Image: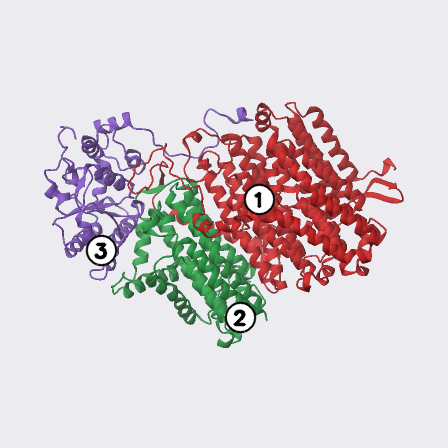
Chain colours: A red, B green, C purple
Amino acid sequence: MNPMELTSPDLLLAVAALTAVVVLIAGNTRAGGWLATLGYALQFGVLSRMAGLGYGEPAIESALHFDVFGWSLFWRYTALSWFFAIITVGAAMLTALFAAGDWGRQYRRNGGSLRLLHTALALNVVAMLLLLGSGELVGMCIGWELVSWASFLLMATGGAGAVQAALKYLVYAIGGGMAMLAGMALVYSLVGSFEPDALAAAVPNLSDGQVWALVLLFGSAFGVKMALLPFHLWQARAYALTPAPGATFLGTISSRMGLFAIIMMIIAPIGLLRLETISGPLGLLSGNEILAWIAVFTIILPTFTALRQNDALMLLTWHGIGQGGYMLLGLVAGDKLGLGSAGGIMHVFNYATYQAAIFMSVFAVVYRTGTADLNKLGGLITRMPISFVAMLAGIIGLAGLPPMSGFVSKWFIYRSLLIEGEPLLFVGAVIGTLGTILSVYKLIHNMFLGQLRLEHVKVREAPPTMSIPMLVLVAVVFATGWFPGIVLDWVAAVQASIGLPVIAHHWGGIDLPAGGLDMRWVVSILLGGFAAGAIIFYGLGNRHRAVHQLDNYAGGHFLSGDVRYQYSANFYAGLMRLIGPWYRGTFQWLESGIVSGVSAASMAAQGVLRPALPGAYLLLTATLLLWVIL
Amino acid sequence: MNWTELILELLLMPLVAFFVGLAMVLMMRKVAARLQRRVGPPLLQPLYDIIKLYGKKTQVSHGVMHDIGIIMAVGGYIAAETLLPVPGMDGIADKGGIITLAYFLMIPALGLALGVGQCANPNGSIGISRALTSMLAYDIPFIIVVFGVAFHFGTTNLADIVRIQQEGGIGGWGIVEMPLMALAGLFAMQAMLAKEPFEVYIAPPEIATGPMVEMGGKYMGGLFVMQAFQFYTMGVLYTTLFLGGGENWLSFLVKIFLVILIPVTVTVIYPRYKTDDLVRLVWKWPTAIGLVGLIFVMH
Amino acid sequence: MSDKPIIPIRDARRQAPQRSEYSNTLARVWSELTDFCRSRSMYMLHYCTGCGAVELPPAMTSRFDMERLGIQPMATPRQADILLVTGYVSVKTLKRVILTYEQMGSPKYVIGICSCTVNGGMYWQSYATAKRLSEYMPVDMYIAGCMPRPEAVIEGMRDLMEEIKSGRADSWKDYYRNYNRYLGNQQRLFGEYWQTPTDILAEAEHYELTGPETRGSHTALLDKNEKPLEALHSHLFSHKQGLKESL
């Protein structure tokens, strides 16, 4: 290894490692959070030096490589790695800033260890950057395990309940790791190499059964991290119980490592075309349709579970699972113009920005009021307007409405499904969106709107260290909604680097002969409409006068502050009268479904693999057995 | 395109929408009156109402979001009108298309929901919870219709959808080629306009007009303006998707008034469903009709 | 009910039209237009206290059809222009009537239907009934009768329409200008801790509707005893908490 050949990825990893060391030493001091923020800012700087990757420049090799037992381990940064890395480091930077000031002091006062928290966060970033740079399967496996253990560490910082949830995650992660090892073994026995390129070259010669085995193994390995159905049960609770910066970081980007790995090991080497040719059980659905249906169920079920939550954080983490489904759905939609995959990849960025904004807003409220219980809040808009704005921008994005960026990525996914003629997937995705609208309105209503409780009359806006990251995110969400071309440039580079069709985009979206989208116009006209509405409202009619919240219609009743005049519990009572019973037993059903699904998969694998590869079959069976036992 | 012409279109389209929408509100009240053997309001009644409401001396606000909610409700529709092609004016129909429009129509609803939320009145909040629930119900058949129509005509551009239908003559209209879709769309429209039997979220005797409970003066005026836009938008959208849009203004107006005549007539002769019954009904019938229609469209 | 005497309320309605105060033609035209629209679009809130309420459904439905005059029922005080009090007003009810009246947006009009609102009617001897509605809030019109027929109700409405159109129906201003007197009568019935959620004094000042008798001894008592009801204005940092301290 020649030190003269150090490249930007090396510098990035070095700075990341240095950040981890610095916060390990100085994490508990007053400056700890600021040093961490500085470290991530430096990493961000290095990443912006590599920005060419996002505009189609070739991959940058890292000086870090080993030769072990004749395998070559190497790391390099491609457009895909860069895209995920910039989100990772951005999220880490803003969450570290969020925790640097008052939040950190309060956390320490309440007995938390800031050193542990910051170190766990920094280790997560290092592990993820290492994973994102890995060039072949062994390095990826190392990175994967590091990421799993680092996120376990971060989750475990949250106290007893969190440790329990994190242990549950660990069980899943170990199972996923086993599946990954089995997948690696299968790849090696089929191809004789651990490099995705070699696998890609060999894919045309593989039988359908072998491809299925690969998809199944890698899909379940990475699906655990991404919390795809049916491996999603660990995530919501584990994330919700993590302290603020940790939950924000994990919720926004950590799970997306699963998507990255799925792109690396399934989408890129096997390719959507091959997935379309392999057929599922009874020959009914093709490979990518099965994945798309998994994605749609991952959208719908967690979203409607979120609708039932009474805790703001649980609600958000359940939505995080659901939003992952959109990303996978877009990726496997597979139209020839690359619309779907662009939407799916873009959604990773969009989701990270608005989800982080909502998380921070919720944590700001928790910081000030001490609760995230949706039935114990209300009316905080007058007390915490910045947090309200952050949450408003965030939920408009999460619900996928214009003018925020979430609309653009979802539009691409819908448009792709329309081109492909997939009405049921389309309707399924829209049902998810509608469920999201219901649930996020409940979130913002029960926290910020409605009646202010007596005990919250003296609540103040969150301090600037917490509100500035929120405002930055709001600006990003809005800007990338108005000019989605900013992100689409990177997305196009990612598509090119993994061999998908590249979308012909422009700053405002895409021009298609059969109906495109130009967000510059859409957002401008919407703002113009709002301006016209404002002129009508403020220009016409007498000036308004704000009244006290108790000056309110109550059928002639005199209201007083000590009697609650708020509607929050069982918010969608009418809907729940119909669909409430559908939830009953869902969890037990799913848990047992996982077990039987796994045994079915193992039987299928048995049928496929035993004739072909006795060795791999044994390994696989052992893995699955372990997984089921665990 | 010529810039001045475009700007003129962008100004004219909402203005036309407003006045046509007012006429539709009048039609609704007149139809109700005639069916109840009454005389009904005079010709300019909707205008009197709006001027009176804006002319109120005291305007009660419950906070900034209450104001912004009204602005979003009115402004969202003003913007949406420019995405709807009318005879001679396409506006910016080619920049958004039908998926964008379907989502645009949720903006006024969201604005209203936020505004009502700040009123801190449980009647309003219950109204919004019911409104969003019924949105969850009717948007499923609506989105099936959107998908089917866009798939059938091979485009999401509303101006192109109108052009393709007009080139095919009456035989090329959506309602002839996709009668089941048109039926499902009509069903969904009844719920989108919140007319009986789907008027769950206004429900004056139950929840004191729900979202409107704390609205007076220009706040209420804004909602009246929004209602006019809503009628117009629904009429034009349905005409665009199924009735070949407008060849000229005369046939266009005839079509959109006929379309709106259906929900405003049905509303007078039905009582109101419970919320869960609404969801059950809409998920069962229009959705099933739409899905069957979809099979015909796609094969 | 205390032994304090009832404060006489002037009949405020018979004042000269207010139009002359407009020197600007445009403002006068606008004022006339809005007055005309007000007269042609009256939203009723009926506070159905007594038997008179039964006469309103026929007045609204097919037989007499108030909607042809632009009159229609509304659900809440915020939306309404006219408060119809349709019968006797007990002391307990009167509190709610006043609350409702104050929540309505001005210009607002009150119509007392049935003899009970005029002088207590057959409840004259009741200890628990307020005899004259106009002692507690400005009443634009009484429609006497026990009960008045729908024709009489509509006749009264038409009279009110005429008065609104000509700008004479401005007794709602009287409530702001003489609030001290009305409040005095209310305090006489309800005691010194009487308070409604609507801050009439602040409203009068906000819309510049105060008169020489807006404030007085009774509003001073209200100021002394009332629980604060200022609006919850949005604020970023409370006045003492500066940016520096919170960093």
Q: Quadrant of the N terminus of chain B?
A: bottom right
Q: Looking at this view, is A212 or B171 the one in front?
A: A212
x, y percentage for residue A325?
62, 51
Number of callouts:
3
Q: Which residue is under mark 3?
A: C57
SS under mark 3: helix
Locate residue B76 relative to residue C83 in the image: left or right.
right
Tag 1: amino acid: Trp
Would you place residue A198 above or below residue A357 in this image?
Answer: below
Host chain of mark 3:
C
Residue B87, visible in the rendered structure:
no
Please state the chain letter of the residue tagged with numbered disc 2 in the rendered image: B
Disc 2 is placed on an element classified as helix
Q: Say whether residue A437 is left or right of residue B227.
A: right
Mark 3 residue type: Pro
Q: Secondary structure at mark 1?
A: helix
The C terminus of chain B sits in image quarter:
bottom right
Is A21 left or right of A379, judged from the image as shown?
Answer: right
Image position, residue C62 (x, y; %): 23, 62
Q: Residues within 10 Å of mark 3 (few under 14, many from 20)?
A: some
Q: Which mark is residue A318?
A: 1
Inspect the image, locate mark 2, and give the three-letter code of the amino acid beneath it: Arg
Tell me the tag on residue A10: none
In the picture, measured across the screen, residue B67 lies left or right of residue A218, that is left
* Residue to which mark 2 is pinned: B163
Mark 1 belongs to chain? A
